């Protein structure tokens, strides 16, 4: 190439070597990557939406052993991050939780109903699951961690209907009916109550299907899965269980009532005595339960652990972002990242460290995202949780403290957590017309929130822009020399960046041939001024003669919020909940900055707090809509307004158990998880109350029992199914609530894990709430029913006595013998 003749001057050839250097070299470097201190090329592979991440990862791992031998000697391929491992672990955890819960449920059914009858109920679990999977597959729902947890949540609930049906058949057979007759009569007796109870639970989850935003996309799978499972379990309970029981059910030798009509068994006798004692004091019991509810709410307000938006799970990965001033050379930024690598490497909890210079946190999700020489990221992978000497949170705090001693750049740490993506815990948006003023206000916001305890990693999205050389063409001089703006721009671009003159082909490879000024002739602003522009008559004109060359700082980016220019200041939090810190941030800024804002400028608080408010409003709306739908359904079933009010009252009482559970476990009240748990609990609690009240009405209307006697008899008859449905639901959630994970592959027991950290805050409120709600259902639902009936009779008699009339005041139903 050096011998290429460029031109002949008076017969003398001018070769390329006479004009410049020909160098076989690389393009100017824009990025640097290192794995544990060794230079590398980082390849990140993303899956298509809907693709199976585990299958993709397995395919890649199968290919790598065949690729590595074809690479130059000394080259190694390492997998530094594998998100499929995260998915495998979570799926394995939830699978083991489902199996553990299933065994616990079958175990309690075995002790309560015997092996054969327990089998009839337990068969509802695989059948309901199978039907549910067919429905979910038809809806295009793939198996993910939310679907798996929904199956855990529904595990105890899906046997509720089967328990009610099989237990009622069992009772009829024990009282002398044939199996076929008992199956028909018992199923007919409870069919509408369990249809209504299942419908109420489904109606609770229906509003959750319309949750907007990213959080809604994440949680949508839960209501869909639970609804599919519950509807499937209803089909199994009403169709399959009676058919099997009619042929194979074994009658028991214990009856609820002996020949004299007295209750059999010490537990039932004690329950009957307690219920009768409470029914004699309905006003006192209702006042006491309301007082207990208020007391628990007050105690929780004083001693509660606070609130949170979404549970923070222990991270397996952290990313340190380094941002130097705009225009910082790649080499200098590389030096800053090396210091971060040294700090991370000194921590004994780290497994691998990847440094990427020339990238920022968003570079890997944008095509062509590299080339930002002033920024870089360091990815820190933590050891397996069983090999860690302390928590990753401690490691992150140690790294953060040491980064505070490094100058020359801004440092922030973002940890990888489970759950949907959310905004930074603290976000303050400063908006207004002028960027210069916004920059001053954003700087003051950063200084003020830095004084608040728990605020760390403060940053903003304002980019002042890197220094730039501005070339302003003198149009008069340019016109005289026959030079235009495009010619000036082309000459500068060719001199500084170079132009692709041709391509050199060597065997199967192609190499770009770039022509530009040598480095000593383009390194300073004076060199730029000396760049030659081809003018009139092919005269080489110095750039300084046709343009004014100056330096200035440009704008890196201009962000808008609601069409107004804005700068966003954000931070992470540590040691305190984000909601508490956000309250302090709003207070400090409202006192010290907002009064000084000029007209047209304002502060807006967003991020996690804004998402938290939106989620709270939606869940409250969803809860109220669900309650309203259930209320309308119950009015239709009972043809009454007062009885649905009694059933809904049991849901309110269940809050006692939820709050006591939060106090005992020291869990924070999660807007997402605890809120979802309460909504789920509402549907479960109503099931038992509906079955109890419906049977009470049957005893009143069909057999003529007085209300008090009907309530006592209904309580005794429904005592075991109510207790069993509650116990099975709690046991189904127990592995997730306690974090105990039995690995049935290795037959080992494990504690904790991200699945328990994420879903435990939902499972525990449901479990505690259901335990208390069951006791309240068996006692307070009959008491409230009796009290509202007494109130109804008193009102009617009062109206009759005041206004008279031809109608007689209502009378109680006559007492009917037990037989």
Image (cartoon, rainbow, N blue to C red):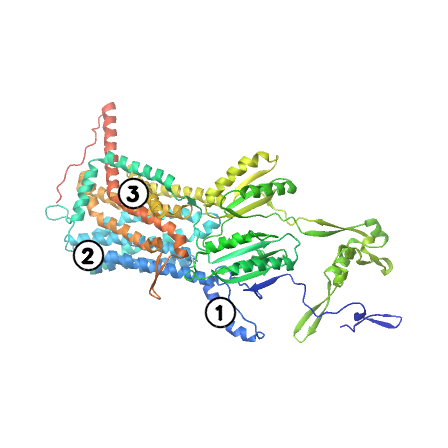
Whole-number angstrom distance, CA of label 1 to CA of label 2: 58 Å
List x then y, in percent, for residue 716. 19, 46
Q: Is residue 186 left or right of residue 424?
A: left
Whole-number angstrom distance, CA of label 2 to CA of label 3: 28 Å
Residue 280's label in the rendered image is: none
Q: Is residue 413 visible?
A: no
Q: Residues within 10 Å of mark 2 (few under 14, many from 20)?
A: some
Residue under label 1: 61
Quarter holding the C terminus? top left
Q: Is residue 94 visible?
A: yes
Looking at this view, name the residue that lies furthest to the right.
10
Q: Is residue 106 left or right of residue 676?
A: left
Residue under label 2: 180
Query: Foreground residue, 180 or 49?
Result: 49
Query: Foreground residue, 505 or 756?
Result: 756
Between discs 1 and 2, the one toward the N terminus: 1
Whole-number angstrom distance, CA of label 1 to CA of label 3: 58 Å
Which marked residue is nearer to the observer: mark 1 or mark 2? 1
Mark 3 and mark 1 in contact (Cβ < 8 Å)?
A: no
- Residue under the point 32% across and 46% down: 769
Residue under label 3: 637
Which marked residue is nearer to the observer: mark 1 or mark 3? 1
Between discs 2 and 3, the one toward the N terminus: 2
Query: Foreground residue, 545 or 303?
Result: 303
Between discs 1 and 3, the one toward the N terminus: 1
List x then y, in percent, for residue 813. 18, 36
- Name the image quarter holding residue 731: bottom left
Task: Indicate the secondary structure of the residue bearing disc 3.
Answer: helix
List x then y, in percent, for residue 416. 48, 55
């Amino acid at each position: 190439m050096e011998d290429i003749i460029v031109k002949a001057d008076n017969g003398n050839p001018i070769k390329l070597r006479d004009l410049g250097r020909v160098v076989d070299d690389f393009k100017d470097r824009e990025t640097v990557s290192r794995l544990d201190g060794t230079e590398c090329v980082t390849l990140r592979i993303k899956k298509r939406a809907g693709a199976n991440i585990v299958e993709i990862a397995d395919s890649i791992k199968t290919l790598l052993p065949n690729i590595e031998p074809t690479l130059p000697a000394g080259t190694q391929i390492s997998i530094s991050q594998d998100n499929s491992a995260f998915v495998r672990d979570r799926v394995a955890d939830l699978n083991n939780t489902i199996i553990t819960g299933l065994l616990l449920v079958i175990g309690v059914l075995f002790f309560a109903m015997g092996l054969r009858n327990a089998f009839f109920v337990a068969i509802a679990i695989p059948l309901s699951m199978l039907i549910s999977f067919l429905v979910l597959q038809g809806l295009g729902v793939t198996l993910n961690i939310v679907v798996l947890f929904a199956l855990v949540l529904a595990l105890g609930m899906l046997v509720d209907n089967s328990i009610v049906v099989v237990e009622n058949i069992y009772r009829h057979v024990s009282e002398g009916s044939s199996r076929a007759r008992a199956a028909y009569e018992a199923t007919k007796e409870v069919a509408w109550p369990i249809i209504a109870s299942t419908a109420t639970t489904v109606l609770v989850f229906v509003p959750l299907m319309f949750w907007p935003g990213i959080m809604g996309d994440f949680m949508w799978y839960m209501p869909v899965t639970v609804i599919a499972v519950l509807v499937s379990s209803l089909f199994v309970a009403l169709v399959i269980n009676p058919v099997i029981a009619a042929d194979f059910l074994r009658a028991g030798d214990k009856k609820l009532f002996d020949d004299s009509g007295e209750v059999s068994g010490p537990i039932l006798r004690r329950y009957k005595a307690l219920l009768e004692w409470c029914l004699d004091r309905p006003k006192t019991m209702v006042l006491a339960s309301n007082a207990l509810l208020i007391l628990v709410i007050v105690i929780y307000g004083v001693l509660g652990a606070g609130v949170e938006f979404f549970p923070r799970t222990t991270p397996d990965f952290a990313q340190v972002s380094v941002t130097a001033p705009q225009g910082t050379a790649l080499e200098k930024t590389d030096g800053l990242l090396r210091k971060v690598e040294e700090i991370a490497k000194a921590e004994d909890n780290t497994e691998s460290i990847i440094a990427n210079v020339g990238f920022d946190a968003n570079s890997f999700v944008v095509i062509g995202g590299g080339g930002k020489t002033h920024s870089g990221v360091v990815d820190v992978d933590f050891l397996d949780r069983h090999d860690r000497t302390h928590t990753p949170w401690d490691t992150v705090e140690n790294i953060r403290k040491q980064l505070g001693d490094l100058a020359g750049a801004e440092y922030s740490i973002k940890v990888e957590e489970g759950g949907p993506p959310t905004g930074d815990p603290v976000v303050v948006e400063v908006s207004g017309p002028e960027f210069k003023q916004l920059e001053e206000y954003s700087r003051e916001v950063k200084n003020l929130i830095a004084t608040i305890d728990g605020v760390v990693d403060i940053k903003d999205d304002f980019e002042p822009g890197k220094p730039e050389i501005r070339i302003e063409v003198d149009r008069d001089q340019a016109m005289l020399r026959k030079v235009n703006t495009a010619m000036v721009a082309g000459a500068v671009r060719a001199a500084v960046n170079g132009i692709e003159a041709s391509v050199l082909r060597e065997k199967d490879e192609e190499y770009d041939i770039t022509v530009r000024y040598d480095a000593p002739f383009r390194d300073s602003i004076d060199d730029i001024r000396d760049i030659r522009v081809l003018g009139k008559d092919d005269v080489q004109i110095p750039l300084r003669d046709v343009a004014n060359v100056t330096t200035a700082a440009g704008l890196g980016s201009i962000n808008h919020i609601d069409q107004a220019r804005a700068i966003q200041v954000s931070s992470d939090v540590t040691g305190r909940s984000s909601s508490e810190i956000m309250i302090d941030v709003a207070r400090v800024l409202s006192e010290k900055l907002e009064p000084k804002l000029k007209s047209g400028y304002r502060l807006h608080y967003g991020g996690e707090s804004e998402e938290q408010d939106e989620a709270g409003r939606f869940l409250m709306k969803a809860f109220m809509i669900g309650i309203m739908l259930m209320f309308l359904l119950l009015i239709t079933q009972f043809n009454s307004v007062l009885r649905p009010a009694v059933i809904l009252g049991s849901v309110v009482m269940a809050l006692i158990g939820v709050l006591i559970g939060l106090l005992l476990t020291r869990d924070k009240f999660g807007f997402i998880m605890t809120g979802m748990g309460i909504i789920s609990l509402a549907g479960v609690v109503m099931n038992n109350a509906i079955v109890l009240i419906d049977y009470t009405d049957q005893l009143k209307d069909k057999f003529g029992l007085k209300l008090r006697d009907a309530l006592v008899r209904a309580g005794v008859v429904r005592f075991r199914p109510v207790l069993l449905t509650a116990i099975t639901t709690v046991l189904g959630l127990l592995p997730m609530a306690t974090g105990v994970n039995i690995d049935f592959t290795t037959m080992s027991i494990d504690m904790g894990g991200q699945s328990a950290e994420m879903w435990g805050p939902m499972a525990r409120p449901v479990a505690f709430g259901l335990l208390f709600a069951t006791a309240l259902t068996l006692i307070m639902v009959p008491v409230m029913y009796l009290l509202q009936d007494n109130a109804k009779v008193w009102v009617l008699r009062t109206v009759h006595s005041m206004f008279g009339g031809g109608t007689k005041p209502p009378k109680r139903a006559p007492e009917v013998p037990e037989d």
